[in-house]
Amino acid sequence: MRNILRLSLVGALLLTSSVAGLSQTASPPSAATQAAQAGKQGTSAVEATAALREKLFAVAVKQTTPIFEGKAVELALQIKKAPQFTAGVNKDEVSVSGVSAEGFSQYVMHDGKKIGQAVLTRLTKGESYVELNAENFSSQFDVNEDVINPEETLDVSGNEEELIAALKKLNSDEAPEEDKDKLGEEKEEGYRDVARDENGGSGSGSGPSGGGETPGSSGYETPERKDVEKAETPEEDPEEVRVTYDGCSPVIDRNQGQVRVQSKTQTLKKGIVVEESACSDSGTNFTIQKSAATCEDKIDLNARIAKPQFLEYYINSQQERIQLSDCQPDPDTTFRITEADTCPIDVNLEEGKAYVETSLVYTDGNNNLQTVRTCERSESVQPIQMTQVTDGCSIVHDFGNALSTEMAMWMYERDGQFFQASPCTQTDKTFKHEKVFKKNSVDICQTMVDLTGRRAIPQYRTEIMVDGAVQYIDQCTPDSNTSINILATSEGCMNPAEFNHDIAAGVSYGLERHYYENPLRVYVNSCQQSNTAYTHDVEISSWKYNDEKKVAQPLSDVSINVSGQVYPIASNMLLPGAPEVAYFSLGEETEQNPGGRYFEGCYGFIPTKLTDIYERPDGTRYEIDNGAGAPYEEGYQCKSTTEGCMTPNDFIHDFAAGYSFGLQRFYYNNPDRNYVGSCEKGDKTFEHNVQTTSWVNSDSKLKAKPRSDVWIRVEGSNHTIASNTLLPNAEFVAYNLIKEEEVARAGDATFNGCIKTTPSSLMKTYERPDGSEYVKNAGAGAGVDKDVCVRKTETKNGRKYTEYSPSPGRCERVFAQEISVQEYKTRVKTTYPDGKVEYSSWSDTKKTKTGKGYGWRVGSDYHNDRRC
């Protein structure tokens, strides 16, 4: 019953108040609009509307959920972003930890766009729940697909106080379950199930969010809470509409490569399904995928082909793999099976034949070679006839029986190449042995020499005749039945350079070698030491220095006399036991190093080196560096110059004396010019040129001192060294008094008739040397007289007439100006400071002339022809 009432109420809300905010120009309701709505909805609706806050918190669906136009669908929601309460509202810091939400959603079409609507009706935590007023918690969002995905975040606008109260109650978990049911029934009491239209929507009316007219809601009005309470009980039981996937198998669309999830809508009364739609696409599709990982290829040996197999599956929204088919051959892919010639040859020595063996293989989709059948004799290749050959086989020798036996191997030819089919084995063919010492009177083996026994032993080799060719079957072997005597001679060994020279003993030993007759003399060894000795002749040739010990040993030339000839055997050699002869000291020497000359300031120094000198036995010198000696002092080496020191601003200026000292610096040559120190005061002076530029006034002294520009002339050019400077020797110049005057000051004035005498100060004006003026108060003056009477001239008009200029004569006509003449008299009215009035006498008559326009004027009698 509770779910039916919730769904009925939600249908109305989704098509009214929540959607109202979806108008293109939707905006929060004005105060006037809210007042108008208050008259319709009652106090509770107004309070709820006033308390709504945009984007109070955010939610997301727990699983992908379809959404329909005008048809409410239940939502299971998780809170993605905690509520952002207004400061001070959440005083007890309520928590949303572990809290989920439930609600309903649909979409409407507006200007060709799908606008999603959702309302929240309940908060849950474990087995506990708290009902929410759906009018106070809503969300609006764009719909791109006909599903709501868990990745989408829905911002919820809602009533902060109601949310806080619900969270407190949910977290306290103190109310028994029956109290919760009672509370839910009380909240739902007064709501009625509003009949839905064909699209599953309810009546439309002004919602708490205000805004423009909502698409799909025209013509409906949400019943007021009081109206719902007064409405008659509907004749039919309330209905519950739900969307379910149960009983709907997914549609496998292999053409599109998709699995389309099906759902249906059920209408329930009292929990019993009374109406059910056919299964239709829910809008959720999954891609059909193929996998060959667990499928073996299908082999057809008769057709010599292999086909890969795969199974079909898809991944549902819970990331579960759902298998759609068993392994099946891939109709688009075929692998051809071929014979692989990778097997060893099967050899039959008794038949003298070689049989070719092959395996059956194919290359699979992963480019891996797969074997279908292992090695067997090929049915398509004929056996190969083999032959027996001796090439590559040796002969077996039996030296005890003086007989050798032939060996041979089986061979076969394939694809132009020869292959060995067996190892070498003995045949029936034999060869007799024969000893051979000489060939063409030349020994075929070297005679063995026994120098210890002083005898020579001849050697022989054994031969056999193979196919008419001689083959030796062994190496040289000594003949134990024959020997020849060995003799010694110095012939060919008389080179003294090859003698054995015993330098330490002072003798050299000659050489000899041995031979035997066969029949000519045959030498059996090279020259070697004999017992003949030659005494050494020794002469000193040079010396070997040991500078560290300061001693030397003689080096000698050694020679011997052989048959009257002198042969050198060692040159410049250190003989064993050669004596050490000490060096002779010649004392210490001091040597200057001009190239290392250095300066300390302007004083030059030449470094020196101390050396101990020794004379060796051969008369050469040995020097020992004893380090640096005392430097040689060259004395003062600098010269002065003004080069690089001619910047006048750097000169030393004595403004009191009226001149500046130039600068100089010192240098020495080593070999280039090297400057010592920086520029400093020199001996040359430059006179100051002074021009007054301004004045320093001392008004208290009535004097001023001049400020001046100072310059000096250096190398033909003027250089300013001071600008507008008060020089130390500047003298005062007195101000010039140019004027004295009385200036009125505050105080009581005196009157004498029209003359007002005011107290005054004597002000003296001086002209400073710079031409400016300085006014000094010199004390009280004699007073300032001023005529303070008010005089006004009064006028009395007299006769007024007109005259012309020029004035026409009798009988004349002239072009003249008309002049208006006013006669008047004046007098002066004098008013004294005390109010007394005096008048002067009237003046003589005065005239005021005012020029007017020009015109022709005629004199008297002008028109009297008789007179004129």
Image (cartoon, helix red, strand yellow):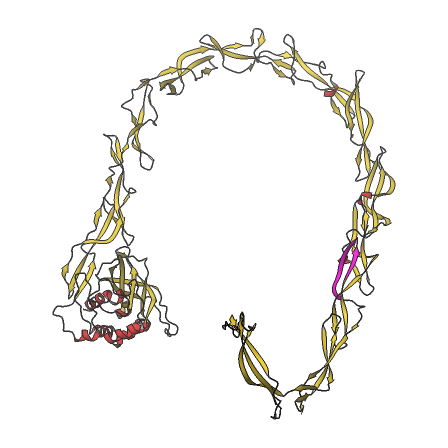
The residue most toward the top is 440
* Residue 432 horizontal side relative to residue 293, left or right: right
Residue 796 highlighted magenta (yes or no): no
* Residue 611 horizontal side relative to residue 1, left or right: right
The residue most toward the left is 235
In percent of width and height, residue 178 lies at 23, 74
Q: In which quarter of the image is residue 392?
A: top left
Q: In which quarter of the image is residue 30?
A: bottom left
* Residue 150 horizontal side relative to residue 660, left or right: left
Residue 131 in sight here: no
Rendered view: 257 above or below 810: above
Identify which residue, 358 or 480, lies in the foreground: 358
Rendered view: 355 above or below 848: above
Identify which residue, 832 or 454, lies in the foreground: 832
Magenta span: predominant SS is strand
In percent of width and height, residue 314 lies at 27, 48
Rendered view: 640 above or below 774: above
Residue 722 highlighted magenta (yes or no): yes
Q: Give the range drawn in magenta.
A: 710-730
Please tell me which residue is depicted at 56% across the width and 82% down the height of the picture: 823
* Residue 281 horizontal side relative to residue 857, left or right: left
Identify which residue, 57 or 476, lies in the foreground: 57
In percent of width and height, residue 602 lies at 83, 51
The residue most toward the front is 866
Identify which residue, 598 or 567, lies in the foreground: 598
In percent of width and height, residue 14 lies at 24, 65
Tally the numbered discs.
0
Rendered view: 697 above or below 140: below
The residue most toward the right is 586
Residue 262 in sight here: yes
Q: In which quarter of the image is the N terminus?
A: bottom left
